[in-house]
Image (cartoon, rainbow, N blue to C red):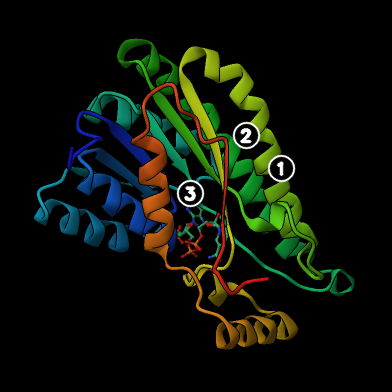
Amino acid sequence: SATPLAGRVAVVTGASSGIGEATAEHLASLGAKVAVLARREDRLADLVSRIEKNGGTALAIAVDVTDAQSVRAAADRVKNDLGGADLVFNNAGVMLPAPIEELATDQWQRQIDLNVTGLMNVIGAFVPQLVQAAAERGVGDLINNSSIAAQNIYPNFAVYAGTKAYVTHLSRHLRTELGPKKVRVSAIEPGIVGTELQSHVTDAGAREWLAGSKETMEWLTSEDIAHTVGFLASQPARVNLQQVTIMPTGQP
Ligand code: NDP
């Protein structure tokens, strides 16, 4: 059907730009009600009005996912206003590559705080809703956004890659706990996607490497990842794509 996600309630973190924004719009177009989480309220408000203009339903919740208490409050709102989440796209993340000898310890910490602790705060707050929804409606989805950096080896990406290896490995373990409760757990591992992610990089060498890569290949778009998430969530309840690597064709 054109709306395979009708009746479902999705939560998308990092929905104010890039992959999260595109995924929220796409899931809404597939019929899901969508709660959109990030810190920039103005961007979330724009997204919600776009979704509503296209006939969808969306709820903006301004939240810093590194703050466990705020995430729990957001989960309560999703439960009260939309009836509980059955699809969580755990997507908020930051990438700050730099040579380890630069000792950019604040950037190490920002990546660990968001990509690991923030991801866990969302899991902690929403897994009860996913399990309940799956018991009542037969399916739930926890889709964690990892990265090809979880698999491949790149100089200057050690800390980021470490956080993403955590995401992929955690996802595989959680699958074995939640699958029997009808909650599918997936890790998506994209190669380079053109978003705001690259704009936060401060290291000159890494910026140069990224600029060069843009010249030599066509990067993925946020919509490419959005369609992947929609595909996963639209499968029959018995089908769980555990790990999906999606690369720009030209990225080695
Ligand atoms: P963007 O920078 O465009 O999006 C990041 C999102 O995370 C924004 O919506 C941002 O919103 C949100 N965010 C940042 N900090 C917080 C916070 N503390 N609390 C809540 N939300 C926060 O980048 P992408 O769309 O590319 O990144 C999304 C995910 O995709 C990340 O996990 C990234 O690692 C992953 N990924 C990206 C790839 C790429 O090449 N782009 C490749 C592989 C994986 P706000 O600032 O408003 O809070």
Q: Is residue 193 above or below residue 178?
A: below
Q: Residue at x 74, y 84 (%)?
A: 205
Ligand 1 is within 8 Å of the C-beta of the residue at disc 3: yes
Q: Which residue is mark 2?
A: 171
Q: Position of residue 176 (x, y in %)?
A: 63, 20
Q: Residues within 10 Å of mark 2 (few under 14, many from 20)?
A: many
Q: Residue at x 65, y 83 (%)?
A: 207
Counting residues from the start of the chain, the first of labels 1 and 3 encountered is 3
Q: Position of residue 92 (x, y in %)?
A: 51, 52
Q: Which residue is mark 1?
A: 166
Q: Is residue 93 left or right of residue 16?
A: right
Q: CA distance from mark 1 to mark 3?
A: 21 Å
Could you say which quadrant of the image residue 42 lies in?
A: bottom left
Q: Is residue 112 above or below residue 107?
A: above
Could you say which quadrant of the image residue 154 lies in?
A: bottom right
Q: Residues within 10 Å of mark 3 (few under 14, many from 20)?
A: some
**Res 109 visible:** no
For the residues bearing labels 2 and 3, Cβ distance under 8 angstroms: no
Choose mark 1 or mark 3, whichever is in front. 1
Three-letter code, disc 3? Asp
Counting residues from the start of the chain, the first of labels 1 and 2 encountered is 1
Q: Is residue 210 above or below residue 49?
A: below
